[in-house]
Image: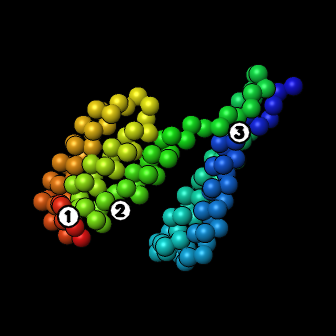
Amino acid sequence: MKQFLTTDRLGAILLLLIGCGTIIQGRRYDVGDLTRMGPGYMPVVLGCGMTALGFILVFVARNSEQNERPEWPDLRATICILAGVIVFVVFGRYLGLLPAAFTSTFVAAMGHRANSFRDSALLGGGVMVAAAVIFHWGLKMQFPLLNWGS
């Protein structure tokens, strides 16, 4: 007997639940109509699409051949990406754009097991240079490059 709750179906159910939650939250805003869209229009439309896709995937998802239960996901990438966002906020506030861009990219890149320390540092350096060129000099954002001691 094949198991119903496979990893594919679990993902489809999660998509279905997120879609329903998006519709519920989007309905709190004025939806409007197609000619005069309100702030809730796009969340409701996207939520409907996600719900429909999740509903279809629940029934189309393949059955497990070996009665395998879903395994816990590897949370390294998720934790590193969330930590990268937090590092950007803290470093951006107290140290400036350059250290924030470098460290947040470095921390987030370490979430992928194939990235080495050197690769993550090179990627962080590249993003740091790109952030300085685009945001500081190109767009003239009021975000100091270095903000030591504030």
Q: Circle 2 sits on which residue?
A: 90
Q: Secondary structure at mark 1?
A: loop
Q: Quadrant of residue 123?
A: top left
Q: Quadrant of the N terminus?
A: top right
| Residue 101 point in image, percent of width and height | 27, 52
| Residue 138 point in image, percent of width and height | 14, 59
Q: Circle 3 sits on which residue?
A: 9
Q: Secondary structure at mark 2?
A: helix
C-alpha gap between disc 3 and disc 1: 50 Å
Q: Secondary structure at mark 3?
A: helix
| Apparent side of residue 117 relative to residue 79 in the rendered image (left or right) | left
Q: Assess disc 2: are there few (<14), some (14-19) or many (≥20) residues with their C-alpha within 10 Å of its C-alpha.
A: some
Mark 1 vs 2, N-terminal side: 2
Q: Nearer the viewer, residue 69 or 19?
A: 69
Residue 148, label in figure: 1
Q: Quadrant of residue 71?
A: top right
| Apparent side of residue 53 relative to residue 144 in the rendered image (left or right) | right
Q: Residue at x 71, y 30 (%)?
A: 62
